[in-house]
């Protein structure tokens, strides 16, 4: 991967989310990117950071996070300087934070070519992942392109957005394809037709582009965000940066990069990829990616006894003995102050459940 490890290659890791669908492990004051969800001995943000050290030098990696998490970022990534931790004063979705880092990198290096990636995804095949990243960097360095890594679907999943791409007489060495359109999360029959057609990939939310290319896209498709960052661009990378960000950033509309740019622009490309990806968005996705015992249980904990229990995800402290009988298709999450026992096939309710708990019990348990 050394040929991409150039002074023009940068990485922006988004690490500002709350991860409410992973409650009660993920909390407002310590969200899932700072947790060792997989039991590997590393937090998700640490694993993501180390993955990208193969792509660019440490000084070219930037973290986009909420100001509330700055100290935790420094705790997990002590190699970074304060200037590499970009702190958002408000939660405005992904488009403003990507504009922020694009303008900052362009001021540092007008030839900046950078990757945007979430901090909390699973990548099982890092060699394949880095290969796709390398091909994307070469393409965006040479073209005015906005590129997204697409994941080859292996099931009709309704939890992901889909990308339809052109497959017009592809040459054997063609790895980058023109995107026709983005599709919202489909119902099951629609997802099945997407899978069968072979013309669709999952939208992984991993992007590659030159800073100049995405800035021009903001200018054309979301001038409100463009104007805000253009007005403060000379203060970026100076001692005034945080002050002007604190003042201007909350004025940005709260909008995702997909809605703000990707669904409107005409220079969108994708690299269909397979590298063992999961966005790890829910407990069910953790269950799907984890190894299982002979009764299809996923066990995180050293002292778990299961009797007539199957298809469950059980995550408990190592020092606690937990005995479970006659459970089928449940999630059991034991934290110090919260015990969650919930049907696995209803786990999409957990995000809404946290709102109910906030109303009944306040924010103490969130």
Image (tube, grey):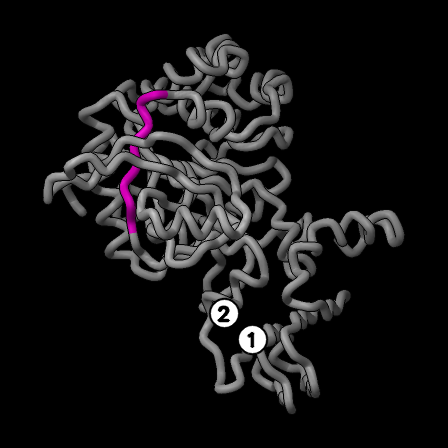
Say whether disc 1 or disc 2 marks the residue closer to the N-terminus.
2
Q: Is residue 35 visible?
A: yes
For the point 65% across and 79% down, which residue is it? Answer: 328
78 left or right, relative to 173: right
Q: How many marks?
A: 2
Q: Is residue 36 visible?
A: no
Q: Quadrant of residue 341?
A: bottom right
Is the residue 100 above or below the residue 230 in the image? Answer: below
For the point 60% across and 16% down, which residue is it? Answer: 248
Q: Secondary structure at mark 1?
A: strand
For the point 64% across and 22% down, which residue is it? Answer: 250
Q: Magenta: predominant secondary structure element?
A: strand
In-front residue for pair 270/137: 270
> What is the CA distance from the residue labelled 1 to the residue labelled 2?
7 Å
Q: Secondary structure at mark 2?
A: loop
Furthest residue in direction right, as rendered: 360
Q: Is 270 covered by the magenta stretch?
A: yes
Read off the magenta span: 266-273
Is the residue 307 above or below the residue 334 in the image? Answer: below
Residue 300's mark?
1
Q: Residues within 10 Å of mark 1 (few under 14, many from 20)?
A: some
Residue 12, x across and y down, in percent: 40, 36
For the point 70% across and 56% down, which residue is it? Answer: 350
Q: Is 253 covered by the magenta stretch?
A: no
Residue placed under numbered mark 2 in the picture: 39
Residue 271's mark?
none
């Amino acid at each position: 991967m050394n040929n991409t490890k150039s002074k023009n290659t940068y990485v922006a890791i988004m690490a500002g989310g709350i991860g409410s669908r992973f409650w009660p492990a993920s909390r407002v004051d310590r969200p899932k990117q700072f947790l060792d969800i997989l039991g590997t001995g590393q937090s998700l943000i640490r694993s993501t950071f180390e993955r990208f050290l193969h792509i660019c030098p440490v000084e070219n990696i930037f973290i986009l996070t909420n100001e509330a998490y700055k100290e935790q970022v420094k705790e997990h990534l002590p190699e970074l300087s304060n200037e590499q931790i970009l702190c958002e004063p408000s939660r405005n979705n992904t488009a403003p934070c990507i504009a922020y880092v694009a303008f900052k990198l362009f001021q540092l290096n007008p030839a900046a070519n950078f990757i945007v990636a979430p901090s909390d995804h699973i990548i099982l095949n890092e060699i394949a992942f880095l290969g796709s990243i390398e091909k994307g960097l070469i393409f965006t360095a040479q073209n005015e392109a906005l590129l997204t890594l697409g994941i080859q679907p292996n099931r009709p999943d309704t939890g992901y957005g889909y990308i339809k791409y052109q497959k017009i007489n592809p040459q054997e060495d063609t790895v980058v394809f023109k995107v026709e359109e983005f599709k919202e999360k489909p119902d099951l029959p629609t997802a099945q037709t997407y899978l069968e057609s072979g013309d669709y990939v999952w939208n992984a939310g991993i992007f590659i582009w030159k800073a100049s290319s995405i800035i021009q896209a903001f200018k054309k498709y979301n001038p409100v965000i463009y104007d805000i960052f253009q007005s403060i661009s000379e203060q970026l990378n100076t001692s005034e940066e945080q002050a002007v960000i604190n003042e201007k950033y909350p004025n940005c509309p709260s909008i995702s990069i997909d809605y703000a740019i990707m669904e409107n622009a005409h220079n969108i490309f994708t690299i269909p990829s397979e590298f063992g990806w999961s966005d790890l968005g829910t407990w069910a996705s953790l269950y799907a990616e984890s190894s299982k015992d002979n009764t299809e249980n996923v066990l995180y904990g050293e002292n778990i006894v299961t009797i007539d229990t199957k298809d469950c995800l059980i995550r408990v402290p190592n020092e606690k003995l937990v005995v479970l009988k006659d459970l089928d298709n449940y999630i059991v999450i034991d934290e110090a102050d919260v015990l969650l026992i919930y049907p696995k096939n209803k786990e999409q309710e957990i995000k809404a459940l946290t709102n109910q708990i906030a109303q009944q019990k306040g924010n103490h348990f969130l």
